[in-house]
Image (cartoon, rainbow, N blue to C red):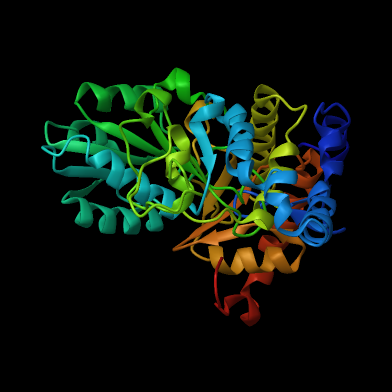
Amino acid sequence: MISRDQARALDSADPLRHFHDRFQLPPGIIYLDGNSLGALPRAAIARSSDTVEEEWGSELIRSWNTRGWIDSPQRVGTKIARLIGARPNEVIVADSTSVNLFKLIVAAAALSPERRSLLSEAGNFHTDLHIASGAAELAGLDLRIVERGRIEESLGPDTNLLLLTHVHYKAGSRFDMAALTARASAAGARTIWDLSHSAGAVPLDLNASGAELAVGCGYKYLNGGPGAPAFLYVAEALQERLVSPLRGWMGHAAPFAFTDDYVPAPGITRFLAGTPPILALAALESGVDSFEGATLDALWKKSIALFDLFAALVEERCAGHGLDCISPREPERRGSHISFSHPNAFEICQALIAAGVIGDFRAPDVVRFGLTPLYSGFEDIWEAVDRLRLILETGRWREPRFAVRGKVT
């Protein structure tokens, strides 16, 4: 039996423990949903206030130059690049993950017009498949969706693009990026990776993995705030060959020349479209800056330990109540959340939230817990599982109020 005192001892020995103080978390709440919306960095409060009151309020339009607004997509992109193993000039912040995915599908498909298939995984995050269906239709591609185990065998001479989410949003299963990118390349296809459940959580080295194209979310592990801008990655060698289908003025080679014709900007900047959302970018930059001083190896080592503790405690304390861990146990095969299936996962999740443990539900039968090493502690995990045990043992989840389904986020 793992005791609370043992969990506290792990916290005391944790080299990342002090990062918890960089975040504002409500007292009494155990927050295990940072894989869906990261916690508020304390620095974002002051930064947002300064951006509104000083940069916007006092400097007004001059802040595009005096406060570096105009370069913020590239500046924040450079900071994200350090977290995903990319060169500084290969990442830019823009739009949403969905919009960026659309840009890359249409732009990259044009490089191999003779290949007519876009391949993806059944059960991929639904918006990725929705975007893929529309982008494929516009690009003249057939969207082919296959089960996870059939992806490699489905790559063929007609495959133009392979679209995969690096860490699965529900189970947390992780693809071998280097192996699959190489396999697709050998078949003559390019791979687009969605890093939404990877960036800031699991080890990433896009350059070493041979990755050419990727998108990712700013509001999950990067702690950029609700609806934070996303990021887009294009390997340096490929940038000048791609032209974004969304040809906005910020992606123009001379945006302030106000010419009627479109000339794409050099490099990654060509994937900008409209005016950058400065307030949101300021918050995102604070979220990315909250990683300063933490190595990716240390973050991943702690994530592994948090997962192992959670899994062991559930096995010890919640046995016989129908929880089935669907996340891979091997660290190299998973991301940084742990998921359990249960016929009443929704009701259990709602009862946990009422008890001060915020995880989330994913249809039809999964309760999911994010493990965010920057601010999650070992005693947090111990207490969360203890509250889960009480809910299961007492049958509290059966209360009628927990079966009421509204908007599920």
Residue 400: percent from the left, percent from the top?
A: 62, 81
Instruction: Give above or below for 189 relative to 227.
Output: above
- Is 81 or 117 nearer to us in this picture? 81
In the image: residue 391, left or right of residue 272: right
Instruction: Give above or below for 281 relative to 203.
Output: below
Residue 247: percent from the left, percent from the top?
A: 37, 51
Residue 145: percent from the left, percent from the top?
A: 24, 49
Q: Quadrant of the N terminus?
A: top right
Q: Residue at x 66, y 33 (%)?
A: 303
In the image: residue 137, left or right of residue 297: left
Q: Residue at x 59, y 69 (%)?
A: 347
Q: Quadrant of the C terminus?
A: bottom right
Report whether residue 20 is seen: yes
Q: Residue at x 69, y 70 (%)?
A: 396
Q: For residue 65, what is the image quadrant?
A: top right
Total marks drawn?
0
In the image: residue 10, left or right of residue 305: right
Report whether residue 67 is seen: no
In the image: residue 87, left or right of residue 3: left
Residue 126: percent from the left, percent from the top?
A: 38, 57
- Is 220 or 274 nearer to us in this picture? 274
Q: Residue at x 50, y 53 (%)?
A: 95
